[in-house]
Image (tube, grey):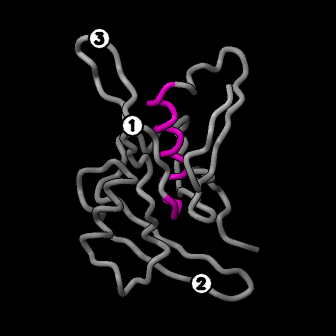
């Protein structure tokens, strides 16, 4: 189908394998963006869907809505961030309702450069001693989520 581009911007064209139609669903696209690209500096926009009672289905509107938060707290200077912002960010990424017990935010420069934002939860997880449960420090590179069970994060 021939289309005309509305203006500036980036087009993302996905080619899906058979049986992967799940990735055509709006909720799935939002889930993937939220997990992996929630903190990139540019907003990711999708057309808003609303419920049409007459048609009894979701209808795509002409209105655009942001899918990602487009903010990465660890990229800002410590002096620009309040304790409330640290707590709010912790609750967002950990899905915890309580504030953290403690947190540390450091920028390391030298042979390797990185920023570290580490939170310690107030309560231990209920499945702390479960051997099958994998979890750990979340690793982001250039604001994109890479992994959440990194065993060796320190640069060599």
In this figure, which residue is indicated by the disc labeled 1?
A: 62
Q: Earlier in the sequence, mark 1 or mark 2?
A: 1
Indicate the secondary structure of the residue bearing disc 1: strand
Q: Main secondary structure of the magenta part?
A: helix
Q: Residue at x 66, y 14 (%)?
A: 19
Residue 155, image x, y percentages:
71, 72
Pick out the residue farthest to the top: 55
Task: Check the picture and name the quadrant holding the C terminus.
Answer: bottom right
Q: Do the residues under discs 3 and 2 have CB atoms within 8 angstroms?
A: no
Q: Residue at x 67, y 37 (%)?
A: 13
In this figure, which residue is indicated by the disc labeled 3?
A: 56
Q: Earlier in the sequence, mark 3 or mark 2?
A: 3
Q: Nearer the viewer, residue 46 or 18?
A: 46
Indicate the secondary structure of the residue bearing disc 2: strand
In this figure, which residue is indicated by the disc labeled 2?
A: 108
Mark 2 Cα shell of 10 Å, populated few (<14), some (14-19), many (≥20): few
Residue 68, image x, y percentages:
44, 51
Report the span colored magenta.
25-42
Task: Check the picture and name the quadrant holding the N terminus.
Answer: top right
Q: Earlier in the sequence, mark 1 or mark 3?
A: 3
Quote the CA–CA distance across marks 1 and 2.
45 Å
Q: Is residue 149 left or right of residue 74?
A: right
Q: Residue at x 34, y 15 (%)?
A: 57
Location of residue 37 with respect to 108 vertically, above or below: above
Q: Is residue 82 left or right of residue 141?
A: left
90 part of magenta stretch: no
């Amino acid at each position: 189908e021939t289309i005309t581009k509305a203006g500036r911007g980036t087009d993302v064209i996905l080619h899906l394998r058979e049986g992967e139609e799940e990735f055509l669903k709006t909720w799935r696209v939002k889930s993937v963006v939220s997990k992996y690209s929630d903190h990139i500096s540019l907003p990711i926009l999708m057309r808003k869907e609303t419920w049409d009672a007459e048609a009894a289905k979701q209808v795509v509107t002409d209105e655009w809505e942001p899918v990602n938060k487009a903010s990465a707290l660890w990229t800002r200077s410590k002096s620009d961030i309040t304790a409330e912002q640290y707590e709010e960010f912790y609750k967002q990424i950990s899905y915890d309702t309580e504030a953290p017990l403690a947190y540390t935010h450091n920028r390391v420069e030298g042979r390797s450069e990185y920023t570290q934002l580490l939170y310690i939860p107030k309560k231990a997880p209920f499945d702390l001693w479960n051997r099958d449960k994998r979890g750990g420090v979340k690793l982001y590179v250039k604001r994109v989520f890479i992994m959440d069970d990194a065993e060796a994060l320190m640069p060599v």
